[in-house]
Image (tube, rainbow, N blue to C red):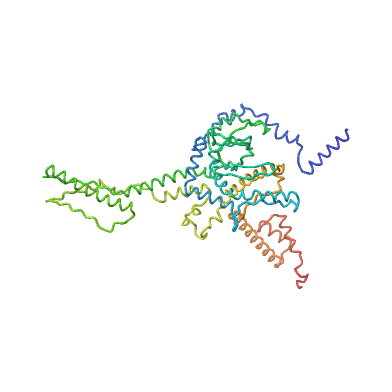
């Protein structure tokens, strides 16, 4: 027994030496045990005692809102042409599309899957059964996910057949669905439809495309969640079932610029309408007129002005221009009977006006907060010189990064659908690392590819310059030490690389020692 224990210890030590690690006991002693000294008094002592979970109710200038109010604000932003086009552009950038078939999503076998094997045939069947559904709903789910941070699909499945249908429509729009989580795992849903305005759904009936929560959206309910949620619990299955908080929207950061944009547009349009009103105050000189003549004269002038108004109104409503001049005859005796009061009618102008630049500023902020340059959503005159039409589509790093986020979230959602399919049809659910398939999208994100190509070209240029420099030094008769010193100090290479490259001094010329073939 003692010999076996010593052998086991030697085996453990040899494995630790092989991987360069430390024992679990030593790691716990260094990283886990010291946490037992953390107390509430220690937190108060260093000025942290006043920090409470109430800080979750605000973020900068934004206070907590209800779930309905948050979704209502985002739904209003969704109807804006700049916001809608920006999100659509991100989705288009993420999904691409086949030139002829229009397919967006592909289920492909991993390279490790042997051709003709059972797993290979299974992936082929999965692709045949589900690819059409994924391509039908990929754009819609990605768009809703970008707007609301979540999107959902109702799954219809049968034993032995697997998933036979998906539904993504107005009945399961994100404002109507409340997902429930245990830890970070979504385990169920409640949908605000039906006879009771409440329909519970399981993880086999619905799937969720969940965008990463990179920004906190202050909202009511998080205090109750903090009171019920226990961070000390290590077993995820013992955590309470809690409603998921709203978040993950790509338009959240654009809320304030959008509000300013709406106010600027409203002020600009209102100013134009106000300036279009032609109004004057006129006085009638009725001296030396009897009461009867005064009434007739005032009535005649009123009918005359009303007639002019009716003619202009009919021309506007009918869409027909007026080709004749309108003349009114007012008989006068002695002095003029009509006088226009200047200054009380049309305003001479405003000291402060809302111009197009005010609107463009907030439009740039709105589109930039979403991650799309304003020139990409219809304002081609904003393109910088030299890039040409569509130049920002190839170089917008922000759009590329957000498009990649959409891809990851959508791929995870479709993997969940395939898990439901394989469970019903094959009686197995693969671990994420053991899945024999990959969710791929047609084409690549153009901005990221442009950056890769630019980086590759820069690296090739540096390599060619380095090779030419080394050849010139060798032709000048540089020694190995001189070559190494030059590469280290002037070319700023590492010593190991410089020593390796300096060996070219001792290399024989191509074709033979004398330099001739």
Q: Residue furthest bottom?
A: 516
The answer to whether residue 398 shows anywhere in this view is no
* Numbered marks: total: 0
Q: In the image, residue 53 lies at what x, y percent?
A: 56, 31
Q: Quadrant of the N terminus?
A: top right
Q: Residue furthest top?
A: 41
Q: Nearer the viewer, residue 461 or 70?
A: 70
Position above or below: 201 against 267: above
Position above or below: 369 against 457: above
The answer to whether residue 358 shows anywhere in this view is yes
Q: Quadrant of the C terminus?
A: bottom right
Q: In the image, residue 510 lies at what x, y percent?
A: 75, 68
Q: In the image, residue 149 lies at what x, y percent?
A: 56, 42
Q: Nearer the viewer, residue 52 or 346?
A: 346
In this picture, residue 489 sits left or right of residue 508? left
Q: Quadrant of residue 48?
A: top right
Q: Nearer the viewer, residue 91 or 326?
A: 326
Position above or below: 298 against 376: above
In this picture, residue 215 sits left or right of residue 117? left
Q: Nearer the viewer, residue 50 or 374?
A: 374
Q: In the image, residue 416 lies at what x, y percent?
A: 65, 43
């Amino acid at each position: 027994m003692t010999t076996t224990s010593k052998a086991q210890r030697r085996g453990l030590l040899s494995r630790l030496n092989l991987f360069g690690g430390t024992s679990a006991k030593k790691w716990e002693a260094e990283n886990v045990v010291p946490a037992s000294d953390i107390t509430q008094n220690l937190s108060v002592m260093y000025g942290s005692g006043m920090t409470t979970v109430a800080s979750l109710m605000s973020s900068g200038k934004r206070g907590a809102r209800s779930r309905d109010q948050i979704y209502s604000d985002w739904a209003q932003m969704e109807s804006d042409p700049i916001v809608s086009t920006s999100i659509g552009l991100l989705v288009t950038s993420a999904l691409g599309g086949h030139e002829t078939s229009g397919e967006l999503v592909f289920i492909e076998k991993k390279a490790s899957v042997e051709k003709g094997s059972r797993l290979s045939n299974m992936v082929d069947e999965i692709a045949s059964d589900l690819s059409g559904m994924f391509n039908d709903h990929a754009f819609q789910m990605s768009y809703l996910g970008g707007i609301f941070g979540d999107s959902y699909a109702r799954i219809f499945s049968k034993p032995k057949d697997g998933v036979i249908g998906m539904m993504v429509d107005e009945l399961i729009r994100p404002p109507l669905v409340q997902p429930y989580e245990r830890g970070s795992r979504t385990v169920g849903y409640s949908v605000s439809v039906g006879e009771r305005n409440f329909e519970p759904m399981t993880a086999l009936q619905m799937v969720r495309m969940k965008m990463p929560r990179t920004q906190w959206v202050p909202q009511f309910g998080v205090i109750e969640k903090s009171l019920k949620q226990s961070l000390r619990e290590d077993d995820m299955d013992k955590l309470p079932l809690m409603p998921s908080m709203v978040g993950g929207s790509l338009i959240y950061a654009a809320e304030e610029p959008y509000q300013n944009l709406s106010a600027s547009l409203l002020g600009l349009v209102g100013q134009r309408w106000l300036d279009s009103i032609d109004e004057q105050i006129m006085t009638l000189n009725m001296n030396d007129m009897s009461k009867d003549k005064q009434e007739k004269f005032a009535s005649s002038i009123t009918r005359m002005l009303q007639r002019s108004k009716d003619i202009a109104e009919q021309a506007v409503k009918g869409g027909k221009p007026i080709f004749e001049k309108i003349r009114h005859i007012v008989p006068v005796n002695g002095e003029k009977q009509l006088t226009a009061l200047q200054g009380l009618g049309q305003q001479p102008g405003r000291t402060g006006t809302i111009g197009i630049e005010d609107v463009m500023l907030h439009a740039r902020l709105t589109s930039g907060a979403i991650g799309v340059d304003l020139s990409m959503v219809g304002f081609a005159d904003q393109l910088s010189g030299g890039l040409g039409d569509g130049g920002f589509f190839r170089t917008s790093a922000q759009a590329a990064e957000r498009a990649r986020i959409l891809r990851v979230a959508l791929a995870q959602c479709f993997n969940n659908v395939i898990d439901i399919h394989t469970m019903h049809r094959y009686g197995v659910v693969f671990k994420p690392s053991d899945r024999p398939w990959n969710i791929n999208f047609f084409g690549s994100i153009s901005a990221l590819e442009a950056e890769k190509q630019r980086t590759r070209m820069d690296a090739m240029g540096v390599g060619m310059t380095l090779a030419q420099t080394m050849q010139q030094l060798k032709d000048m008769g540089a020694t190995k030490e001189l070559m190494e010193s030059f590469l280290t100090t002037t070319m700023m290479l590492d010593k190991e690389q410089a020593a390796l490259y300096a060996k070219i001094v001792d290399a024989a010329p191509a074709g033979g020692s004398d330099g001739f073939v």
